Amino acid sequence: MLALELLGPVRLLRDDAVLPITVRKTLALMSLLACSEPLSRPRVVDLLWPTLDEATGRRNLRRELARLREAGAAQSLRVEGDFLSLDASVALDARAAEEDLRSGFVERSISRWRGTAMDGLRLDDAPGFEEWLDGQRSRLQRLRTSALEVSARDHEQRGELGIALQRIEQLLALDPLQEQHHRDAMRLLAATGRREGAIAQFERCRAVLRDELGLQPMAETAALAASLRAAPRSAN
């Protein structure tokens, strides 16, 4: 069984063994086909080799297809006339993570992530591909964010505040500018008896907003910090 993993560095696996494909253009081709409707060869050439004439670009595309065949991944592609697509039999972690979240298997969705989506996959000579890649990463990060937010809420509702806080910390690692998540962290830290940690979280929030955006925290965030400072210290 072939599987293509995009939720981290891109890799193609056969029966759980990673195939020896390390050329970025080959990995970029697989990523394109995984996240798109069938693409024509001219469109693929335009995205991956925009500075080349079509004949040279098509020759490069044939080379990448040959590289996949040599790696034992020929059946990962579907070719219909001048159009290429990922074969439906290929397991795709991004699709599985989305289906897990939609079906309520939130923790399984989260567990599929190995890092930043398509991490390390950059093509400096292909700006059209870079623009496409940025859009796909944003889409997949929204999926990851949604799963982490649902998980944090579910664990908090069950009284599992430590796990809820871990999820909020993961969210802040993804996007430290999300002030709501800073407030969530402050609230959970205070609820677990770590008032000083909650106040320190506010200071981190204030620093990142100032340094990155030139902004001050929202009134709601400042009010939460003030209430934490005014609260009596709990006895040790």
Image (tube, rainbow, N blue to C red):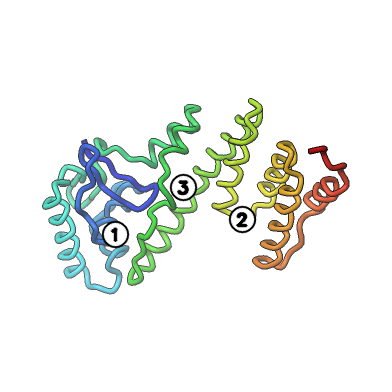
Which one is nearer the viewer's eye here, 83 or 6? 6
Q: Residue at x 36, y 70 (%)?
A: 124
Q: Residue at x 56, y 34 (%)?
A: 151
Which marked residue is nearer to the observer: mark 2 or mark 3?
Answer: 2
Q: Residue at x 28, y 74 (%)?
A: 51
Give the residue number, with chain letter if any, for mark 1. 43
Q: Are marks 2 and 1 in contact (CB under 8 Å)?
A: no
Q: Are marks 1 and 3 in contact (CB under 8 Å)?
A: no
Secondary structure category for the residue under label 2: loop
Give the residue number, with chain letter if any, for mark 2. 176
Q: Amino acid at mark 3?
A: Leu
Which marked residue is nearer to the observer: mark 2 or mark 1?
Answer: 2
- Give percent across and percent down for residue 72: 13, 46
Question: Marks 2 and 3, how far apart in space?
Answer: 17 Å
Left or right: residue 141 compared with residue 70: right
Which marked residue is nearer to the observer: mark 1 or mark 3?
Answer: 3
Give the residue number, with chain letter if any, for mark 3. 140
Few, some or many residues within 10 Å of mark 3 (<14, 14–19, 20+):
many
Q: Amino acid at mark 1?
A: Arg
Q: Amino acid at mark 2?
A: Pro
Secondary structure category for the residue under label 1: helix
Left or right: residue 214 compared with residue 39: right
Of callouts 2 and 3, the N-terminal one: 3
- Give percent across and percent down for residue 141: 49, 49
